[in-house]
Amino acid sequence: MIRYHDVSQLTTAALGRAKRELQANLNLITPHSPAHVPIQAQMQAIERELAERAQSQEVSADDLTVPRRLRP
């Protein structure tokens, strides 16, 4: 069964907090524990969402640049 982690509804601050908490959980469990799998999957979903948001902001910032013909 594949479980999808939808984190798109979380704020950026909530994503950062969740990522820190998940990292702390990883540090507390024993190496090679099966608990690593769902924690890492959730962390990957958070990292993807943060990367998409960063890319979206870059694109938005590029859209706001002054066209060359209007520059002094």
Image (cartoon, helix red, strand yellow):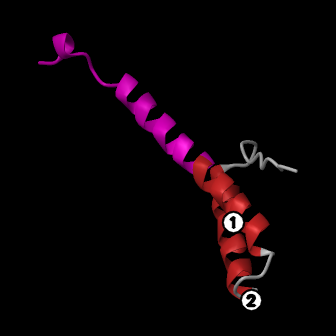
Give percent across and percent down for residue 51.
53, 47
**Is residue 56 on the magenta stretch?**
yes
2 relative position to 10: left or right: right
Front residue of this view, candidates 63 and 28: 28
Query: Is there a contact, CB below 8 Å, between mark 1 and mark 2?
Result: no
The residues colored magenta run 49-72
Residue 62: which quarter of the image?
top left
Rate crowding at label 2 as few (under 14), some (14 to 19) or many (20 or more) other CA atoms within 10 Å: few
Q: Secondary structure at mark 2?
A: loop
Per the rendering, the mark at residue 8 is: none
For disc 1, the marked residue is 40
For disc 2, the marked residue is 30
Residue 44: which quarter of the image?
bottom right
Front residue of this view, candidates 67 and 43: 43
The residue furthest top is 69
The residue furthest right is 1
